[in-house]
Amino acid sequence: MLSTDKTKRAQIFVCIAIVLMLISMIGASLIQTSGGRVKVDEVNWVDTDGIRKTALLLVPENATLETPAPAIVTSHGFLNNKEMQDLNYVELARRGYVVLAIDMASHGDSQIAPGVGNMMPSVWQGVLFLADIGYVDTARIGVTGHSFGGFSSNFAVTMDNAAGTNLISAVLVNSMDPTYDSDGDGVFDNVYGSRDVGVVAGEYDEFGFNIFDENGVKQPKPDYIHSDEAQSFLYFGTDRGEEPEREANTVYTQEVDGQEAMRVIYTSNIIHPWSHFSARSTKSTIEFFEQALGAPNPIPATNQVWQWKTVFNVVGIVGFVMFAINCAIALLATPFFRSVSSLGADQTLTAPAFKGKKWWFWTSLVISAVAGSVIFLPIMLATKSATYERTFLNQAAVRGVSTWAMACGLVALVMLLVTKAVNKDAWAECIANVRITPARLFKTILLALTVVAASYAWVFIADYFFHVDFRIWVLAFKRFNPVFLLIAIPFMIMGSVFYVMSSISVNCFNYCKLGGKEWVNTLVLALFTGAPAFIITLMQYIYFYQTGNLLFAVGESALFVVWLFPLVAILPISVLVSRKIYKACGNPYLPGIINAIIVALVSSANTCTFY
């Protein structure tokens, strides 16, 4: 039972957390709507392929039936969602463009489909949707997409050509190669015709812009701009021959079919996923469409406000985490959930007596971190976690990461069993806090579900009233369709193996005072828990920047490393959440289950799903 002071403190922090989330919603919305000058709606329609699509439609006040405005379709990449384009749609809408930020099929809130074939036409279907709107200038429709969204933009051009409509007048392909040879005959061609076309090519893009020498050997990056493919694009689909090499970040124009068309390749020192979070990439997007379509409300490309939306989003993340922690603590004081806690009202936790066995504390942490690092890629490859078709448990990426998490949980279990032999005194003291009755475990699970439901209610409120969520770069707490609850259940169970074992390890066996201070212990445990994700990512990109080649490049290894980016933050944060809740109740299962459920929902709502 919690003391009155602890309960009141938790209730106060719940209120503070709610205030932070409200500040986040309102602030992010004000940026997204340009202070109310842009109307934002979520739209749903069934496209010509019979697939239900969802998108954010941003309409600036200058777009009317009397004064139609240019319009742009923005698209995320594989395993993402429409909100990943917020830096682009915020900046484009405030410059007067109508923007349709789509969820591709099998992503976000759009209909789940069997495979990649249903994803490819997504940008084209967005173009058709815009073309039917009276306040859209159909002579000035552009498309842009990141990664697979860039591929879908290229495919939209193919569809536009086949339809003979020429609805698309400008194409900006981001982090994806443009089309060089449309029919595969080895001869460069100009599939884009008289359209204005640009490419955002990160100099350290892990996946696109690969070039090879005459012997077929892959060359190190960032030499893409000098390749025959890049030069053919800048020369409007022809081999440059003896012509001088054209440069990056320079607009080239040429008359095509009686119209002046432009080609440009923007380069910057960024990796593939960083284009989602890059002021330079956004600057290129703004400059390209202003030159290609004309901006109804011209604003210098360096004048960007999306970063402020990110600041407000982060405030929301802080509020969400604070709410989850203190909601759990506050509910522990209620009569129904009081038995979840093993502590009395005035009881405090004491650190276990290591009795000179601190060497095992450090050794077990190192072994766990190394083991987690070593097994990651083999597990991801063995489980075939990158697929573009129907797959077991519907979400291959989440399935793979959850399998790895479960394996890491088993490693933690082995470490605890070894502790029994190494440090018997500490084992006897610590294991007492691990024992739990079935009835108490049932209430623990029920309390965890209640906390997650209450926490996610604020995410749904943010989406429904303000069309925003709580996110920073690749980490996002977003609203999900109810179907994802069923999809995520297996991942919650698999994740619980890790997060519960992590909570037991962190709180029951490694809860001590390093240097006489508990916070030092918490920090050390947080860093070691996130170490596998951090170590693999660091190794990959240090080597990449030094050599121009990827260290992990077998199969889909490079893609798997990118998936670790959000875990670099999630894993340490889970330790902080776990420690805070455990100190209030002495029950290691409660924070472990809460972490497992939230991470499963975050993962399932921000990936690709195939039925």
Image: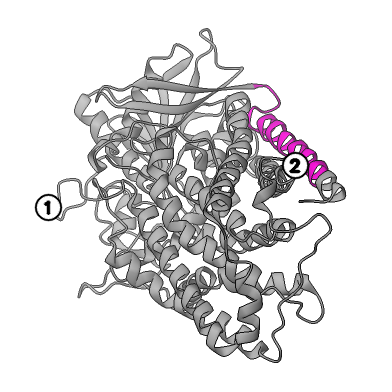
Tell me residue 119's x, y (percent).
Answer: 30, 38
Q: Which residues are magenta?
A: 10-37
Disc 2 residue type?
Ala
Residue at (66% x, 77% y) in the render = 429
**Is 318 left, or right, of 410 in this rendering?**
right
| In this view, 537 is above or below 266 | below
Element marked by disc 1: loop
- Between residues 502 and 549, which one lies in front from this camera angle? 502
**Does residue 289 show up magenta in the picture?**
no
- Between residues 249 and 430, which one lies in front from this camera angle? 430
Element marked by disc 2: helix
Q: Earlier in the sequence, mark 1 or mark 2?
A: 2
Q: Quadrant of the C terminus?
A: top left
**Is 449 left, or right, of 241 in this rendering?**
right
Residue at (82% x, 79% y) in the render = 516
**Does residue 25 show up magenta in the picture?**
yes
The residue that label 2 is drawn on is: 17
Q: Image quadrant of residue 460?
A: top right
